[in-house]
Amino acid sequence: PKVLVLNGVNLGRLGAREPNVYGNLSHAELADQLVATGLTLGLNVQVRQTDDEAELVRWLHEAADGELPVVLNPAAWSHYSIAIRDAAAQRTADLVEVHLSNIHAREEFRHHSVISAVASGVIAGLGPLGYELALRFVAARRPG
Ligand code: DQA
């Protein structure tokens, strides 16, 4: 079974971007790690990143049409994009919202995510392990 891991705006800068907050792993390294984890779980994991909101909307439509589970880090869009929320709300399979950092322990404007109400669940503050745990959830939820 296929799973999309979708990373939003600025997450392509992982490793270089505020490593004290987001860690030293690059996006490519994170992607490799998640693909490897997927193999151990019997999941075909595709990792994508975009700084283009419209592109993320299209990927969420693709997931809805294909009934594909999604692990989504909407990054800054979490806090204000009704367009991403409305696209995520169309989901036909599980959607897990992941944040590397603990958004609740940071600035006030990060405390609320407009995505969370339409997600199956939310993981925040566990770093890259949060994505791994989200994949475990998706694997456990697959029928058969
Ligand atoms: C983030 C948290 C957001 O507040 C921030 O805008 C990001 C990354 C995280 O993974 O911790 O870009 O989603």
Image (spheres, rainbow, N blue to C red):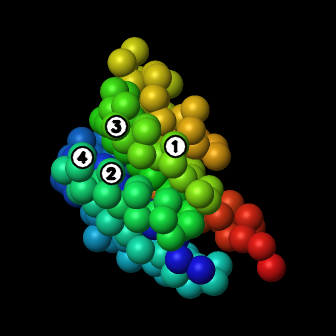
Marks 2 and 4 close (CB-CB < 8 Å): yes
* Front in this rendered view, residue 34 or 19: 34
- Real-space CA distance between mark 2 and mark 1, rounded to the nearest whole angstrom: 11 Å
Q: Which mark is residue 83?
A: 3
Mark 1, secondary structure of its residue: loop
Q: Look at mark 1 in the image and give the residue it sits on.
A: 89
- Real-space CA distance between mark 2 and mark 4, rounded to the nearest whole angstrom: 6 Å
Confirm if mark 3 falls within 8 A of ligand 1: no
> Badge 4: few (under 14), some or many (20 or more) residues near its Cα, within 10 Å?
some
- Identify residue type, mark 2: Val
Residue 99: x percent and y percent?
A: 45, 43
Report the label total. 4
Mark 3, secondary structure of its residue: helix
Confirm if mark 4 falls within 8 A of ligand 1: no
Residue 80: x percent and y percent?
A: 34, 27
- Identify residue type, mark 4: Glu
Disc 4 vs disc 3: which is toward the camera?
A: 3
Marks 3 and 2 close (CB-CB < 8 Å): yes
- Identify residue type, mark 1: Ala
Q: Look at mark 4 in the image and give the residue it sits on.
A: 53
Which badge, 4 or 3, is on the more N-terminal residue? 4
Residue in the image at 33% along x and 32% along y: 81
Q: Which mark is residue 57?
A: 2
Q: Is residue 113 visible?
A: yes
Marks 4 and 3 close (CB-CB < 8 Å): yes
